[in-house]
Amino acid sequence: MVTRTVLFLIILATIVSIGCAGGKPGKTVEPISSNSGGTTESRAGPVSPTWIDAEVEGPAISIPAIEVDSGKMLHFRVTIQETSQAYMVYKLGGETYVRANICPPCRSVGFSLLGNTLVCNTCGTKFEASTGKGISGACKDYPKAQVAYVISGGRITMGMDDLLTAYENTQRPGLP
């Protein structure tokens, strides 16, 4: 009986120590280069979102471009037609992307950026960050539609109609 208990404790300790070690031995983080200003940044894991308040300017909204340029992934909400809608903004390969921030089947409002992939924070479905197209997972048939924008005066500005169109397109399977 004592031998079985000791054996069980040894196995349990081994499992716990493997779980606590985390990651894979010898794994290194490669720099992800950015084309904006020739800077290079290193990312050890997913870029988690930072929620910000968007500024409403008549039929448009805007957010500060410097926040995205600094490597952050931004999420913001806008109320359009009496409905609160979520959006995300991130920079990838020197290009800024604005997309609807919803995963309709799992009802998630939240994505992280892992390299060139958007990952749903609820169901784990993966999408190509540059196209919004689904890669794998339960919700992959609901690509993240892109929002048209302009960058001027240090602000990323989007029209309410463009935001609404992207949000509605993301709620339907397939690309528009």
Image (cartoon, rainbow, N blue to C red):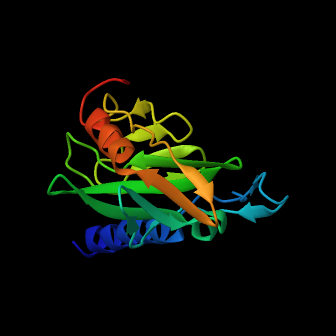
> Does the rendering let one see residue 32?
yes
Horizontal side of residue 132 vs 109, given as left or right: right
The image shows residue 73 at horizontal and vertical percentages of 52, 62
Work out which residue is located at the far left of the displayed protein and give it. 82
Horizontal side of residue 70 vs 14, given as left or right: right
Residue appearing at x 40%, y 32% in the figure: 136
> Does the rendering let one see residue 138?
no
Task: Locate residue 174: give its quadrant.
Answer: top left
Number of numbered discs visible in the structure rendering: 0
Which one is nearer the viewer's eye here, 137 or 176? Answer: 176
The image shows residue 14 at horizontal and vertical percentages of 45, 67
Q: Is residue 54 above or below residue 60?
A: below
Residue appearing at x 63%, y 69% in the figure: 66
Task: Locate residue 53: give its quadrant.
Answer: bottom left
Which one is nearer the viewer's eye here, 166 or 27? Answer: 166
Q: Is residue 19 above or below residue 89?
A: below
Residue appearing at x 47%, y 72% in the figure: 20
Q: Is residue 42 above or below residue 138?
A: below
The image shows residue 42 at horizontal and vertical percentages of 72, 63
Where's the C terminus, which quadrant?
Answer: top left
Horizontal side of residue 108 vs 47, given as left or right: left
Where's the N terminus, which quadrant?
Answer: bottom left
Work out which residue is located at the far right of the displayed protein and give it. 38
